[in-house]
Image: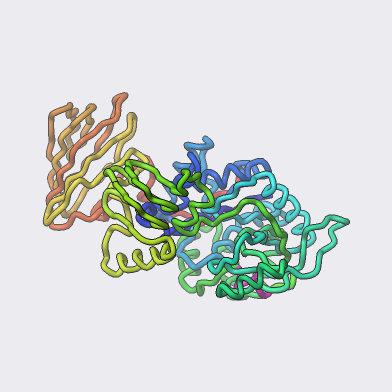
Amino acid sequence: MYAVIMAGGSGTRFWPLSRETMPKQLLKIGSEQTMLQQTAQRIMPLVPHERILIVTHGGLLRDISAQLESSFGGSWSNSIIVEPEAKNTAPALGLAALHISRIDPNAIMVVLAADHFIRKSDLFLDAIKLAASAAKKDYLVTLGIKPGRPETGYGYIRSGAPIDLAGTKGVFKVSAFVEKPDIATATKYIAGGDYFWNSGMFVWKVGTFLREIERLQPELHSGLQKIRNSIGSGNEADVAQTVFSTLKPVSIDYAVMEKTDRAAVIPVDIGWSDVGSWTALDEVTDKDAAGNIIAGNVIDLGSRDSVIYADQRLVATIGLHDAIVVDTPDATLVCSKDRAQDVKKVVDELKKRKSEEHLTHRTVYRPWGNYTVLEEGERYKIKRIVVNPGAKLSHQLHHHRSEHWVVVTGTARVSNGDKEYDVHSNESTYIPISTKHRLENRGRIPLQIIEVQNGEYLGEDDIVRFDDDYKRHDTVKRSPLPEIPK
């Protein structure tokens, strides 16, 4: 059995806490672990680390590796499949299935989302084992969530006739997949008892799945074959990029599950939530006596049934009812709970304005530490940079800016052109424009510096890397498929 965790989403409905570079699956929601870490740990009783694969895009590669390695140890670089381009779930899962089939064409493939919450882990594992027994009989199995309310935000699955698996009960043919209903239709679904929420979790035999792609999606199958044939040529990344650029975006539901005659569903009650918006915190987080979820630097007087989150600044709230307040250093969200789904529209507007508030936080985490943008204006930007003990930034240069560094704590080992020297606390140094340079912390405490940038262009993409411990200059050309374990 192999687990494939889909971790490429952007989680826009959790803005401003989630950003494009720090989406929902990388956040701690309802747990001391991130949602990605929770998902991996949840399946580990059935699938060992070595057979867990993560599908994501290149922009999240480093953060995902760092989170998994910090939580579970070992190297996860050979467990990550990189989508050359986001084309929805069918091409991504086809790529994962292609990789697994090279190792074991008869393997069972469990598909999970990185940003789901499941309260009843034991029942979840029981359902996966039951689904695997059906998958061995060439069924494409999905888990259907027994609905607790008439929900208009989910698609539904209607169950049909039971499938007999040597006397084992609980597996049914899929009668129909239906789109998100209105409230009246959803209420009828609940009353009927044979409709279930579409969880987006699947279990199938990898060979069966690839055969159904070949039969139902010949264009996708042809593209996957081109990628397979390129493996070992040294040109895999370019071939995969070309293939994905020509594919139409299509979901796995529409591409395969709604068309196949091998679809099966297992109804489950596992305490599931897709944590799709701020209101979903009601299902995954403890509330106070007034029904509030309050976290951070908050003073609240008399609010009820509200979500109030403060990152750093003090947030004071008085008499709110069914409201959401989320404050971060660079953005604040205030809305009523019944408009929580519209947060995505705010993110869409930020993208139209080309505002960075949808893309990243003021504090950005890197493999070597983090930096925080303190202030910026025309031709200048001020950052606080923290370098972990034993870590160093890449050897780099900038074409459009110079930098002044003032050391606040620790000792900086600086490479500046052809010179190398130490800069101590309360000392400074200057990096001219277009000069190769490097910052390193050889000490035992975090190195903290204040950096003042000056120049005509101060974007983060004005960077040329020559040497990097984290191989970030290689990311673009990385093969989409990891090496097959020996």
Question: Bounds of the magenta span?
Answer: 253-259
Was residue 95 drawn as part of the magenta stretch in this picture? no
Whether residue 172 sits left or right of residue 301 in the image: it is right
Direction right: furthest residue:
167
Give coordinates of residue 479: x percent, y percent: 49, 55
Was residue 255 drawn as part of the magenta stretch in this picture? yes
> Where, by quadrant of the figure, is residue 437 drawn?
top left
Give coordinates of residue 250: x percent, y percent: 54, 72
- Reply above or below: 426 against 166: above
The residue at 69%/53% (across/down) is 104
Is residue 142 among the parts visible in the rendering? yes
Quadrant holding the C terminus: top right
> Where, by quadrant of the figure, is residue 204 drawn?
bottom right
- Reply above or below: 416 against 379: above
Frontmost residue, 120 versus 421: 120
Is residue 232 among the parts visible in the rendering? no
- Reply above or below: 392 against 208: above
Give coordinates of residue 59: x percent, y percent: 40, 54
Q: How is the image coloured?
A: rainbow
Whether residue 233 sits left or right of residue 364 in the image: it is right
The residue at 44%/42% (across/down) is 66
Give coordinates of residue 280: x percent, y percent: 50, 55
The residue at 53%/46% (across/down) is 78
Most common SS among magenta residues: helix
